[in-house]
Amino acid sequence: MKRRTDPIKTFLPILAVLLLGACGGPGQDIASGLRNNYNDEISARVVAEEKGVKSSPYCSGLSEQYSDSLLTVINLYNNRVATAWGLPMLAGHPDMEGAISVRICKDQQISAYALGNTVVVHEGLLYKIESAVYNSADTQESDRLFLSSLGFIIYHEIAHIELGHSTKRSDPYMEWQADTFSESAIKESGLDPAGAQIVFSIAEEIVPGGSIGHVAPSIRAMTAQMQMAAF
């Protein structure tokens, strides 16, 4: 059986470059203690925000506009990714006992994130993806690219939950791990890897220099291309 490439080991040099400025000095132990306290505060806030999302009428129902795409992405994760990798939690919408909840919130916010055990995707981001992919007469191709873009986003956020990031302050290492997980899941699911580049192009338009805990989208896109080629 072909040995699977370990993306973490393969791209450790790239990661070292991205995180070089984050290395600690003599005050590292003190800083670590402050980070732990900060993470405790974040965890408490996340619990409250997750409850808010689950009780919000804007995030409670399955959007008719995106229901087919969302359920396809979830089923591919459940049947191919989680089964193949032996993951203990499967994705469900809107809730499934012992599983990750996936919520689509009906507003114009352009974002997606993980709260505790819940993946939240705002319709504003889905509108941006639609604008990026539905620009030709080839509807079948556009559908395929939309599906792969949605898959990359949801699998990225599932990674934050599976890797224990969703109650901590985000940093570039966590984002790199989530990108790597999502890229691998995209391949396992059979979705088109081009979706990742579409998501990064949208991020480049909105936050070209990156945001808190995230390096510049152009760097993430370049790293994703290299890793996809190695898988």
Image (tube, rainbow, N blue to C red):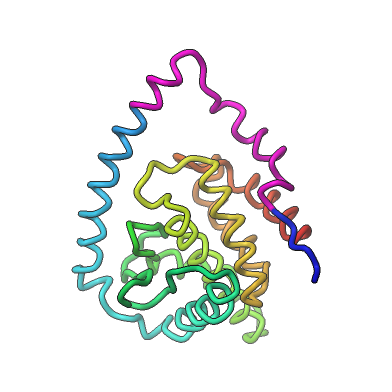
Q: Is residue 173 visible?
A: yes
Looking at the image, residue 20 sits to the left or right of residue 124; the answer is: right
Residue 202 location in percent, x, y? 55, 57
**Point 43% across, 70% down: residue:** 89
Looking at the image, residue 176 sits to the left or right of residue 159; the answer is: right
**Point 60% across, 74% down: residue:** 84
Q: In the displayed structure, would residue 169 be above or below residue 177?
A: above
Q: In the displayed structure, would residue 34 be above or below residue 137?
A: above
Q: In the displayed structure, would residue 157 be above or below residue 30?
A: below
Q: Is residue 51 magenta?
A: no
Residue 193 location in percent, x, y? 67, 68
Q: Is residue 9 magenta?
A: yes
Residue 122 location in percent, x, y? 37, 65
Q: Quadrant of residue 55?
A: bottom left
**Point 48% across, 78% down: residue:** 74
Q: In the displayed structure, would residue 5 be above or below residue 76?
A: above
Please provide the residue range marked out in magenta.
7-33
Which residue is farthest front? 1
Of helix, strand and loop, which mostly describes the magenta segment? Answer: helix
Check the picture and name the quadrant holding the N terminus: bottom right
Residues 44 and 122: in front is 44
Q: Is residue 201 visible?
A: no
Residue 199 location in percent, x, y? 57, 61
Looking at the image, residue 102 sits to the left or right of residue 72; the answer is: left
